Image (tube, rainbow, N blue to C red):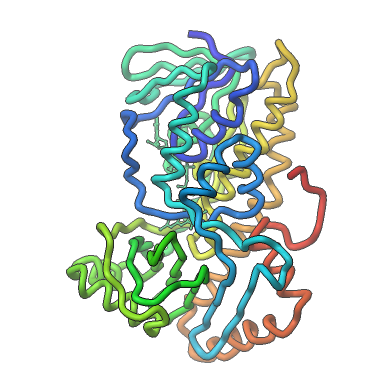
Amino acid sequence: MEFDAIIVGAGLTGSALAVALRSTDLKLALVDGRAFSTACPDPRAYAISPANMRFFSRIGIWRHLKHHHACPIHRMCILGDAGGELEFSADDEGIEALAWMVEAGALHEELSATLDRQHNVSFYRPAVPTSMSVSRTHAELVLDDGSRLRGRLVIGADGANSWVRKECGIASQDIPYGEIGIVGTFRAERPHRHTAYQWFLGSGVLAWLPLSGDRISIVWAIPEDQGRELMAMDSAQIAARVAAAGEHALGEFALEGAISSFPLRMLRVDRMTASRVALLGDAGHVLHPLSGHGVNLGFRDADELARRLALLGAGHDPGDPAVLRAYARARAEETFALQTGTHLMRTLFAARAPALAPIRNLGMNLTGRLPVLKSMLVRYATSGRLFHGESND
Ligand SMILES: Cc1cc2nc3c(=O)[nH]c(=O)nc-3n(C[C@H](O)[C@H](O)[C@H](O)COP(=O)(O)OP(=O)(O)OC[C@H]3O[C@@H](n4cnc5c(N)ncnc54)[C@H](O)[C@@H]3O)c2cc1C
């Protein structure tokens, strides 16, 4: 079968790219190793940045998500391990919300329902590619179900262990943090008032993120041995530990559903493109979850690539090296800034040397008193940019 673009990976970022291309003439294939299911196996909830809220609006999936699933974050409190405190509020910054929390299941459902109605996508799932060959004019993928797909562009949206990335020889550096990210949803005794909390604790970084109703989603980045201990507890013990780690700021907790854990790492790639190939999402960058930006960066990739492909006239080659170069250039700065900033922050707070604690906590307190620096950090947290600059939002 012949396609303009073959997207390998129908996770959140690959699916968002396919949806963003729905009003183009491009003929798309979407390949995923997992069978289609309306149930989403991902227990995470994501803080969608204002830039991605605008992307979702443009591709037509925000209205329903906003009204039925999204919980705005109006305030964020960050607390250090020795009295440091930093607070951000949407009101102070003159914006509607710092971010919107949306559960992965709701995002997955919305994207799948939109893809279902889309005419320019053929689905290959469950199927995985077993070989890829690239010529001057095309790439060809052979799938394990025997299908042969020819496309002018292959998009690797197949996650952190990307097969596409390895197959086309893009080198990567993988830095494991020796921590796991524990994720779960809890009912809180007291209302969260749309406030997100993040603690930099001796035992890692803990975030409480508001969801609709009285629920919160937590991400606890914790050393592997302590994490395994926590995962072995029963649900009442886990709820008590999570509530106590945040000094019962929202009273007692009750666990809703199961908790899950993910190994944490940083992954950098040497380049985001190769001949007739572009990487997207975790295939091209993985970062520590303390910044809450992993999937946001992936959606920004999807937005950028979709805009560039949509601008091409009929018959124009989507795998044109100039298009791929422009995509890679456009994504380089934000990705570098967020990966580097997140890694530095994680390194600073993971350092156990007692002399460092007062310095980093003083830094937080001083930042809170410097409105310009604070606004820069809000901009960094909401858009990945420290300064006002060219934006195509
Ligand atoms: C603990 C934790 C908390 C996080 N919290 C946040 C947060 O608050 N905010 C945020 O922005 N980000 C967060 N992230 C990051 C976020 O989860 C990821 O960035 C995001 O899930 C990546 O999406 P993706 O679509 O790029 O990749 P994936 O979700 O990994 O999807 C890849 C898809 O490709 C398919 N696939 C894989 N290999 C193949 C193959 N060979 N052939 C065919 N299909 C294949 C898979 O089945 C899957 O559907 C967090 C991450 C962790 C670990």
Instruction: Judge by depth and name the residue closer to the eye, 246 or 116.
Output: 116
Q: Going 68% across and 44% down the picture, which residue do you hit?
A: 331
Describe residue 11's horizontal placement relative to residue 371 as left or right: left
Instruction: Judge by depth and name the residue closer to the eye, 106 or 49.
Output: 106
Residue 178 appears in view: no
Q: Going 38% across and 62% down the picture, which residue do you hit?
A: 181
Describe residue 320's horizontal placement relative to residue 179 as left or right: right
Judged from the image, the quadrant occupied by ligand 1 is top left
Q: Residue furthest top?
A: 1
Instruction: Judge by depth and name the residue closer to the eye, 43 or 150.
Output: 43
Q: Quadrant of the C terminus?
A: top right
Residue 378 appears in view: yes
Q: Is residue 114 above or below residue 67?
A: above
Q: Is residue 37 above or below residue 88?
A: above
Q: Quadrant of residue 130?
A: top left
Q: Going 49% across and 90% down the picture, which residue do you hit?
A: 354
Q: Residue 222: where, in percent of width, then height?
A: 37, 70
Describe residue 383's horizontal placement relative to residue 14 as left or right: right
Q: Residue 294: where, in percent of width, then height?
A: 52, 52
Q: Quadrant of residue 382?
A: bottom right
Q: Quadrant of residue 112?
A: top left
Q: Going 73% across and 41% down the picture, which residue do you hit?
A: 329
Q: Is residue 81 above or below residue 121?
A: below
Q: Residue 73: where, in percent of width, then height?
A: 55, 64
Instruction: Judge by depth and name the residue closer to the eye, 163 or 35.
Output: 35
Number of on-image labels: 0
Q: Residue 54: where, in percent of width, then height?
A: 66, 45
